[in-house]
Image (cartoon, helix red, strand yellow):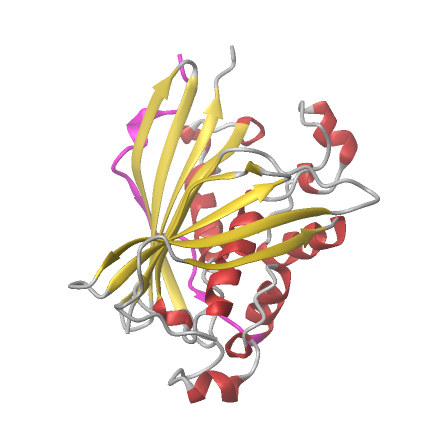
Amino acid sequence: MTTLTTAVEKGTELYLLTRTVTRDRLVRYAGASGDFNPIHYNDRFATEVGLPGVIAHGMLTMGLACATLTDWLDDPADLISYGVRFTRPVPVPDPGEVALEVRAVVGTVDPEAGTARIDLAVTLEGTSVLGKSQAHVRLH
Amino acid sequence: MSAVNADFVGRVFTGTPPYVASRAKIAEFAAAVGAEAAVHVDPAAAQALGYADVVAPGTFAVVIAQRAEAEYIQDPAAAIDFSRVVHANEVFTHHRPIVAGDQLHTAVHVDSITERAGIAMVTTRSVISDGAGELVCEVTSTLAVRGEDS
């Protein structure tokens, strides 16, 4: 649990974490979010529409990345905004799991506004899966 | 030619009934995205930070936005073939956190429909307000819709 102050410097790495994704988590996210697109649980359907197999919900990848930041901050209200582009699918094998690495780095600091941009890079085996993954947080 | 009906740009959809945020749904969503902070599940921890009840994770508003976007996307006249849709980008702008007990109204604005190389990019902005009419969150979402020939 951390509070960011206006003294934080651009380029500072805040943390590097790994989040694993399994089929179990896809089913859990489908239920929690109401997104029951079969490409997220049915291999036959996913293959028929040209995917390598079942893929994670883009919004699950985004949600996992967002949660690393809000868990790291003291107060979830310090998250002002978070946006991403979905650039690459995340295939989830069965059996097995995939490990997503989330690296949070201070992108810019605006001391007058009292905000900072935090870049949440999400990679799968070294390859980025989200583009322009940028959060804005309130500084104290 | 894109199949998506560009005449919908500028339209606003407000026909989805209010969404009532519950402790159970917030806890379920927090578990799904690995959000482990106590404020998502423990009312006492949330109250210690000054919130009336448990606080939803930062991307929870997608549940509310997608439910409301369906009024537009499922309108046959909008001509969006959901089997040809890929989620292209998503942005959440929070004005305050969503907490359990909130009764949330959503207005879905069709901000733009552009087409390039047979792919239509459809951008909606879901404006989520509370029972008092105060702005809670805006969710901007862009869908890429492949045309019949691509």
The outermost residue toward the left is A112
Residue B94 drawn at (x, y percent): 33, 61
A68 left or right of B107? right
Residue B45 drawn at (x, y percent): 50, 85
Residue B148 drawn at (x, y percent): 52, 14
A44 left or right of A19? right
Task: Work out which quarter of the rendered image holds the N terminus of chain B and state it.
Answer: top left
Please tell me whether residue B42 belongs to the stretch shown in magenta: no
Predominant secondary structure, magenta span: loop
- Which residue lies at the image location 56% right of the left edge and 48% below the top edge? A61
A44 left or right of B91? right
Find residue A48 and report its image quarter. Answer: top right
Find residue A47 and report its image quarter. Answer: top right
The foreground one among B145 and A10 is A10
- Which residue lies at the image location 31% right of the left edge and 65% below the top edge? A8
Please tell me whether residue B18 belongs to the stretch shown in magenta: yes
Residue A71 drawn at (x, y percent): 51, 69
The outermost residue toward the right is A95
Q: Is residue B100 above or below residue B135?
A: below
A20 left or right of B30? right
- Which residue lies at the image location 77% right of the left edge and 40% below the top edge? A93
Count the labels in the image. 0
- Which residue lies at the image location 26% right of the left edge and 57% below the top edge? A109
The magenta segment: B1-23
The foreground one among A24 and A44 is A24
